[in-house]
Image (tube, grey):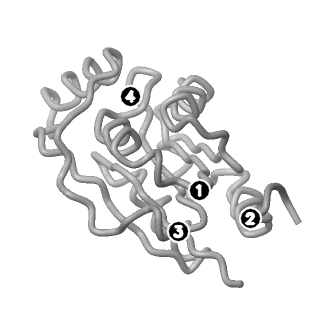
Amino acid sequence: MEKKFLVVYYSRTGITKKIAQEIAEYLSSDIEQIIDEKDRSGIRGFMTGGRDAMKRELTQIKPVEKDPANYDIVIIGTPVWAANITPAIRTYIMQNREKFKNVAFFCTTGGTGIEKTFIEMEVVCKKKPIATFAATSIEVKKNTYQGFKEFIEKIKSHNLTGGEQ
């Protein structure tokens, strides 16, 4: 049976979007961008976004088109804001976590907060990820990130009955 993958991501600057598109391409998966209804552009958007992330705030997101219940593995991506999940991804997870069969996580960061973000994603999802991947913004811009192929292979080889093949 062919596995069905969905890549879901939020991206303010395009860095996380670039990784999401690569994952979707490698897995031949569907992809869905989460759109925050709150204006996160510019320095003001950056500052309020960081504050909202630290406070673990939810936000209004545009309705999604793809139902995560229709996928074997949902791969969720977020930038790291103030060592946390973005409000848009937190909201998406809270609205859909009961529909996730399996999850994998990826994040992009200016440099820190990766482990804390993955732990927070796991707590909010109430599911342990089958794989995680992180890259810094500089690595993404220079295409020098490590561990991407291993991340893809873990997802591909995951046995849907529980574990790797």
Judging by the rendered image, the residue that carries numbered circle 1 is 101
Left/right of residue 29 with respect to residue 158 in the rendered view: left
Q: Amino acid at mark 3?
A: Tyr
Which element is circle 1 on? loop
Disc 2, disc 3: CB below 8 Å? no
Q: What numbered label is drawn on residue 71?
A: 3
Disc 2, disc 1: CB below 8 Å? yes
Q: Of the residues under marks 4 and 3, which one precedes in the sequence? A: 3
Q: Is residue 151 above or below residue 12?
A: below
Percent x, y of residue 30: 45, 74
- State which quarter of the image contains the C terminus: bottom right
Judging by the rendered image, the residue that carries numbered circle 2 is 160
Q: Of the residues under marks 4 and 2, which one precedes in the sequence? A: 4
Quadrant in which residue 85 is drawn: top left
Q: Is residue 123 above or below residue 34?
A: above
Disc 4, disc 2: CB below 8 Å? no
Q: What numbered label is drawn on residue 81?
A: 4
